[in-house]
């Protein structure tokens, strides 16, 4: 009986090449298959340094002259600036961005999980309705908070200051971030669950160590 | 007296004046979400929105699929507006992979997006009508919507979830005689829209129920970060098609609709007026479109983005719709965040419904142009 089963299992082990059967390819096989066909695996659009335009340069200079080495200002691409700062300084930077630069609302708050460097990045995308010159600009304000191996949302070191008192519009976005990444926002008046069910008992689902079933 | 309760069950303290009302998730006045409303007599004391009943983790799913496999499932959050939800995704992926889009494809995309905006707005208007007990206003838009669905079916082969926009252009070229057919239907539709005005927007019952309810001032609209028709009904002139034009919107002739009142009536009137602008855009785009040429730049199999990030946004039927994509030299995106108008406008609900009559709740709620499935993603 067992020998019959072994025989059934055999052909898939000995077969080579991607064309045989419907078995999914392993990574090495896929790489070999594509290399034989002359398809390279290098990135399609390698990141090139881009020259920074005049208007963005003026914003960048204002921030740099105020905060110096506390912030890193990058020009990502046209109309997109990015400010990275430490989580201790983010409230001051946000106040400066609102009062001096004229950004008045948040479009989104995203978390990005980086398990390798044990950090979770929180990115605020800020825009402006009142300043005509800033209408096409979106400013990304990013900070990183520590990431716990075993998360305990609300009680561990993954926490930062809420920006709700600066940008009122982040209220629901920060609530979503808290439940999806386990990053607690200090000073937020309402840190309840928003989208997840009340009886969710697993880790925050947008962390990289939460795997979708069957994948 | 204190009865023995099973573990985990708590009794809520009941006030003799304030009553808690769960509106939804199955109530026709709320869609797939719940509003926890506290009322004092007929007046709403507080409102706590509870979305998430249709949360499907689209953003998480996108991390497991490559840029091409992501196309069909990312349009699911709002299938009535599927061109507009795929539009920023295509723009973002094109920028990430450095793809040039053929000129003709850009025009076709704009036409598809505007047709879809009309389809969405008509659907929204139909439900707004039935919310307020106006059955004619349910039947008319629901019927006229079919005209545009037929056009999109001719373009793409599917009625609603067509995944017509792809990174690099559109899936296939327009069918023969599409231009004449489209212009004929747009002409008919404009005539038809004017009849809506007589039956719905000048209806004294509608006016008495919506005018002056749920007023959102200009300052608050900005402070709360609202977007789309809610923002423009409060007097802020902001439309991404004008402010940060994508594809070929800068070549096309249209105007931003702005109203100052900020009440439910203005919020329901702005999308209606925008349908006229959509018709203008479609007509102009058909006139200026190159008559032949390629419609799609083919991508490499399994394309990879560099180690960078991109944020692209468009104006959808419900406001700004942005995609934030982080890539790390892999064929799959590292993180996809969809910033949707519905979720941004959700914050208005506790704010606008406070102090409002309970009877005005449906009209204020649906005037926010809120689509629960999109907000949950």
Image (spheres, rainbow, N blue to C red):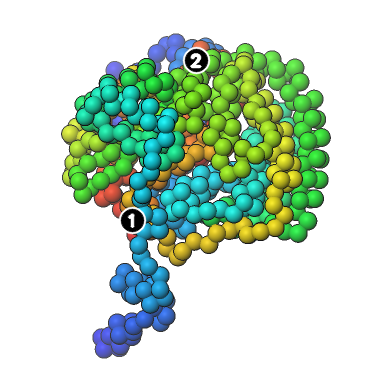
Q: Nearer the viewer, mark 2 or mark 1?
A: 1
Say yes or no: labels 2 and 1 on the same chain: yes
Query: Upstream in the sequence, badge 2 or badge 1?
Result: 2
Q: Look at the numbered disc 1 and give the secondary structure of its residue.
A: loop
Q: Quadrant of residue B6?
A: top left
Q: Quadrant of residue B169?
A: bottom right
B269 lies left or right of B87 = right
Which chain does the numbered disc 1 sit on? B
Query: Which residue lies at the image location 47% right of the left edge and 26% below the top edge?
Result: A134
Crowd band around label 2 with a 10 angstrom C-alpha radius: few (<14), some (14–19), many (20+): few
Q: Please name whichever residue, A144 or B133, is drawn nearer the observer in this view of the structure.
A: A144
Question: From this viewpoint, is residue B55 visible?
Answer: no
Question: From this viewpoint, is residue A122 visible?
Answer: yes
Query: Which residue lies at the image location 34% right of the left edge and 29% below the top edge?
Result: A60
Which chain does the numbered disc 2 sit on? B
Residue B330: x and y in percent read 34, 57
B43 lies left or right of B123 = left
Proximity of marks 2 and 1: CB atoms separated by less than 8 Å: no
- In the figure, A85 relative to A101: above or below? below
Q: CA distance from mark 2 to mark 1?
A: 43 Å
Residue B97: x and y in percent read 44, 54
Residue that badge 2 annotates: B219
Q: Look at the numbered disc 2 and give the secondary structure of its residue.
A: helix
Q: Please name whichever residue, B5 or B361, is drawn nearer the observer in this view of the structure.
A: B361
Query: Which residue lies at the image location 72% right of the left edge and 58% below the top edge?
Result: B175
Query: Which residue lies at the image location 75% right of the left edge and 36% below the top edge?
Result: B140
- Image mark for residue A66: none
| Number of numbered markers | 2
Q: Please name whichever residue, A35 or A26, is drawn nearer the observer in this view of the structure.
A: A35
- Image mark for residue B329: 1
Crowd band around label 1 with a 10 angstrom C-alpha radius: few (<14), some (14–19), many (20+): many
Quadrant holding the N terminus of chain B: top left
């Amino acid at each position: 009986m067992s020998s019959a089963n072994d025989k059934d299992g055999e052909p898939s082990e000995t077969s080579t090449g991607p064309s045989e059967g419907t078995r999914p390819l392993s990574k090495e096989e896929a790489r070999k298959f594509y290399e034989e066909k002359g398809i390279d695996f290098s990135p399609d659009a390698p990141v090139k340094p881009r020259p920074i335009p005049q208007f963005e340069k003026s914003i960048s200079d204002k921030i740099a002259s105020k905060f110096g080495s506390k912030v890193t200002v990058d020009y990502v691409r046209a109309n997109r600036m990015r400010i990275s700062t430490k989580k201790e300084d983010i409230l001051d930077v946000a106040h400066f961005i609102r009062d001096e630069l004229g950004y008045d609302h948040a479009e989104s708050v995203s978390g990005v999980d980086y398990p390798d460097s044990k950090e979770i990045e929180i990115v605020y995308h800020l825009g402006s309705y009142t300043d005509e010159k800033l209408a096409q600009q979106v400013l990304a304000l990013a900070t990183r908070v520590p990431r716990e191996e075993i998360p305990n949302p609300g009680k561990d070191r993954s926490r930062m200051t809420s920006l709700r008192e600066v940008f009122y519009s982040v209220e629901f976005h920060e609530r979503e971030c808290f439940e999806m990444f386990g990053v607690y926002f200090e000073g937020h008046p309402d840190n309840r669950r928003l989208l997840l069910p009340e009886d969710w008992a697993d880790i925050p689902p947008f962390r990289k160590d939460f795997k979708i079933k069957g994948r | 007296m204190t009865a023995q309760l099973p573990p985990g069950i708590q009794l809520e303290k009941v006030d003799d004046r304030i009553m808690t009302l769960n509106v939804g998730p199955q109530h026709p006045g709320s869609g797939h979400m719940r509003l926890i409303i506290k009322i004092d007599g007929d007046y709403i004391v507080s409102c706590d929105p509870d979305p998430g009943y249709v949360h499907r983790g689209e953003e998480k799913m996108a991390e497991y699929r490559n840029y091409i496999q992501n196309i069909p499932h990312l349009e699911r959050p709002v299938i009535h507006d599927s061109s507009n939800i795929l539009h920023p995704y295509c723009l973002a992926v094109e920028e990430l992979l450095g793809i040039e889009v053929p000129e003709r494809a850009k025009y076709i995309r704009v036409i598809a997006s505007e047709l879809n905006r009309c389809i969405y707005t008509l659907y929204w208007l139909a439900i707004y009508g039935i919310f307020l007990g106006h059955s004619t206003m349910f039947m008319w838009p629901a019927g006229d919507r079919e005209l545009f669905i037929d056009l999109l079916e001719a373009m793409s082969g599917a009625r609603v979830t067509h995944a017509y926009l792809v990174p690099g252009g559109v899936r296939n070229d327009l069918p023969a005689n599409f231009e004449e057919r489209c212009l004929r239907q747009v002409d008919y539709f404009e005539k038809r829209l004017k009849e809506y005005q007589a039956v719905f927007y000048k209806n004294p019952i509608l006016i008495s129920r919506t005018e002056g309810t749920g007023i959102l001032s200009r300052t608050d609209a900005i402070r709360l970060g609202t977007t789309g028709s809610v923002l423009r009904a409060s007097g802020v002139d902001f439309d991404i098609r004008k402010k940060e034009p994508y594809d070929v919107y800068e070549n096309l002739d249209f105007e931003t609709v702005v109203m100052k009142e900020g009440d439910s009536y203005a919020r329901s009137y702005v999308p209606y007026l925008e349908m006229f602008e959509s018709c203008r855009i479609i007509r102009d785009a058909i006139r200026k479109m190159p008559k032949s040429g390629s419609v799609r730049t083919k991508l490499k199999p399994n394309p990879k983005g560099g180690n960078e990030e991109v944020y692209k946004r468009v104006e959808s039927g419900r406001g700004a719709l942005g995609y934030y994509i982080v890539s790390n030299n892999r064929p799959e995106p590292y993180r996809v965040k969809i910033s949707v108008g519905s979720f941004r406008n959700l914050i208005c609900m506790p704010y606008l419904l406070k102090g409002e009559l309970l009877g005005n709740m449906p009209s204020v709620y649906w005037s926010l142009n809120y689509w629960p499935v999109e907000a949950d993603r």
